[in-house]
Amino acid sequence: MTVKDDRAEFKAETRRHSLAMGQDVTLFEEARDMTVKAGQHRYAYLWTWMGVPIIQMPSDIVVTQEIIWRTRPDVIIETGVARGGSLVFSASMLAMIGSAGKVIGVDIDIRAHNRDTIEKHPMASRITLIQGSSVAPETVQRVKDEIPKYAKVMIVLDSDHSRDHVLNELRAYGPLVTKGQYLIVADTLLGRLRPDQTPKNQASVWLPGNEPLAGLDAYLKETDRFEPDDEINGKMIVSSSPGGYLKCVRE
Ligand SMILES: C[S@@+](CC[C@H](N)C(=O)[O-])C[C@H]1O[C@@H](n2cnc3c(N)ncnc32)[C@H](O)[C@@H]1O
């Protein structure tokens, strides 16, 4: 018996559902309210990747895997290293797709024990750590110096979440993203919370208007190089970064 090849149909159907989900405001708000409640138990802090704490929600990790698999970047630049899990994740993805690529991690404060974890990890050879404020000109220059000519470059911004910092990061790192690659702005959910839902159990409090989505919205008024990926953003209902996945569509 011949079984019908439904791969294209399946793909089209999943796309349709993702786009429809992106339009379902009630579902988004219910999921957001659940995410806020889970955040009281530091939900995003409960996961590890290859043994290293990664401060991301599982759906953000899975969708970043989808992006890396599809776009095959040579260099992934990440601002905000924390305990190193997201760097190890990206490096492991590059290893799994058979790329010779590398990950550049920037953080203002790379603590000795976190550096130790990263430098002793099996993925360490693919990771370059740069300590400094992500928006300091000397840091940006050090990052640029690490990018080989003609490399396909993807960026993940996950450091200081204030509007102006994110906007300045976007101005500094956005131009480094190459056509066809992705720009991920983390924690855009902060811009979609009611003010009473803003997490107060963290070192800084980022109220709507002074958070990553506000920085991203301002940046998108300055450039036409990036377009939100509606299929990806649509399905990110239990995510730190709904609306934070953008494709670079121009040189
Ligand atoms: C949310 S954590 C990063 C989480 C990490 N990406 C992960 O997924 O595990 C934010 C990090 O940003 C760093 N940070 C804060 N301000 C910064 C700045 N101006 N430049 C670079 N890093 C900064 C903090 O030190 C902290 O480690």
Image: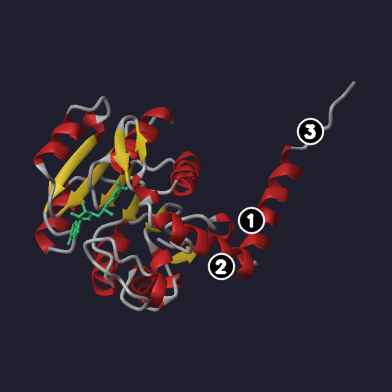
Q: Position of residue 130 (x, y in %)?
A: 14, 47
Label 1: how many Cα within 10 Å (few below 14, some 14–19, many 20+): some
Residue lying at 48% horizontally and 39% vertically, measured from the top left: 69
Q: How many marks?
A: 3
Front residue of 177 and 57: 57
Front residue of 193 and 169: 193
Mark 1 touching mark 2, by CB under 8 A?
no
* Above/below status of 115 relative to 125: below
* Residue 29 tag number: 2
Look at discs 3 and 2 and give the one toward the viewer: 2
* Residue 18 tag number: 1
Q: Is mark 1 within 8 Å of ligand 1?
A: no
- Would residue 111 appear left or right of 171 to someone viewing this image? left
Front residue of 176 and 191: 191
Q: Which residue is mark 3?
A: 5
Give amino acid for label 2.
Answer: Glu
- Cα–Cα span, label 3 and label 2: 37 Å
Q: Answer whether residue 223 is visible to the viewer in this image.
A: no
